[in-house]
């Protein structure tokens, strides 16, 4: 049985905390759909606390096996995050990296495309290199929606540029417009 509710997945790296704070602040609270975030961070990430301080959303780390529910969740440091059909999977601590990354944006995006199909919405924000490009392509190939932060606005524009160059992006928008587009798509 295919899911009927939208699921938003967001990936960021260098410059991502600032972009994520701006995005969370611009979203309606409470979140009308589940949103899962991967940010390349160090081992002692306080991302959930940082994002919660940015706004009234209750942002928290996701636990392995949790049901997919409305809210904003972030990956734990040094663990991959995957979306299954009805639950969330969190890898073992220090699981193998995908290329250079753990957590991997591609792991999150590809698992969402596979389990949620056209209900998937993928967002790539500020970052270096190319993590997330293959995942955005997977989401787009199943009929989901893909969004990249406007490179000129991103602190580190390489990830959005790589996604654009790969033809993986439906919408290229500044953060405030990404929030509006997400609200529109999840309505």
Image (cartoon, helix red, strand yellow):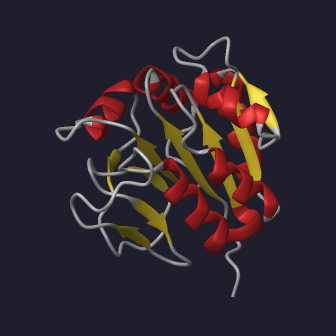
At horizontal 43% and vertical 45% (from top left) the residue drawn is 38
Kindly give the residue lying farthest to the left in the view shown.
Answer: 44
Place residue 153 in its image quadrant. top right
Between 133 and 20, the residue placed more toward the observer is 133
Kindly give the residue lying farthest to the bottom in the view shown.
Answer: 1
Place residue 16 in its image quadrant. top left
Measured as percent of width and height from the top left, residue 127 is found at: 51, 27
Query: Relative to 148, is 75 on the left or the right?
Result: left
Measured as percent of width and height from the top left, residue 129 is found at: 53, 31
In this view of the protein, can residue 32 be seen by the observer?
no
Measured as percent of width and height from the top left, residue 146 is found at: 74, 45
In this view of the protein, can residue 159 be seen by the observer?
yes
Query: Relative to 57, is 93 on the left or the right?
Result: left
Kindly give the residue lying farthest to the front in the view shown.
Answer: 99
Vertical side of 112 occupied by 73: above or below:
above
Vertical side of 109 occupied by 183: above or below:
above
Query: Relative to 161, is 84 on the left or the right?
Result: left
Place residue 79 in its image quadrant. bottom left
Between 27 and 150, the residue placed more toward the observer is 150
Vertical side of 24 occupied by 33: above or below:
below
At horizontal 77% and vertical 58% (from top left) the residue drawn is 144
Quadrant of the snapshot with the N terminus:
bottom right
Tally the marks.
0
Measured as percent of width and height from the top left, residue 4 is found at: 71, 73
At horizontal 70% and vertical 51% (from top left) the residue drawn is 186
Between 170 and 32, the residue placed more toward the observer is 170
């Amino acid at each position: 049985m295919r899911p009927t509710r939208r699921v938003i997945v967001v990936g960021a790296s260098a410059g991502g905390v600032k972009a994520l704070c701006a995005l969370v602040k611009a979203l309606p609270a409470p979140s009308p759909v589940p949103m899962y975030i991967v940010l390349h961070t160090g081992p002692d990430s306080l991302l959930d606390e940082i994002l919660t301080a940015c706004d009234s959303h209750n942002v928290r780390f996701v636990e392995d096996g949790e049901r997919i529910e409305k809210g904003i969740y972030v990956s734990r440091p040094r663990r991959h995050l995957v979306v299954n059909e009805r639950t969330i999977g969190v890898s073992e601590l220090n699981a193998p990296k995908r290329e250079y990354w753990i957590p991997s944006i591609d792991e999150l995006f590809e698992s969402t495309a596979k389990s949620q199909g056209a209900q998937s919405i993928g967002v790539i924000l500020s970052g270096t290199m190319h993590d997330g490009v293959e995942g955005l392509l997977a989401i787009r190939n199943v009929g989901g929606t893909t969004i990249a932060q406007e490179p000129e606005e991103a602190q580190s524009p390489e990830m959005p540029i790589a996604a654009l160059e790969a033809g993986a992006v439906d919408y290229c928008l500044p953060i405030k417009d990404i929030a509006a587009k997400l609200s529109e798509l999840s309505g």
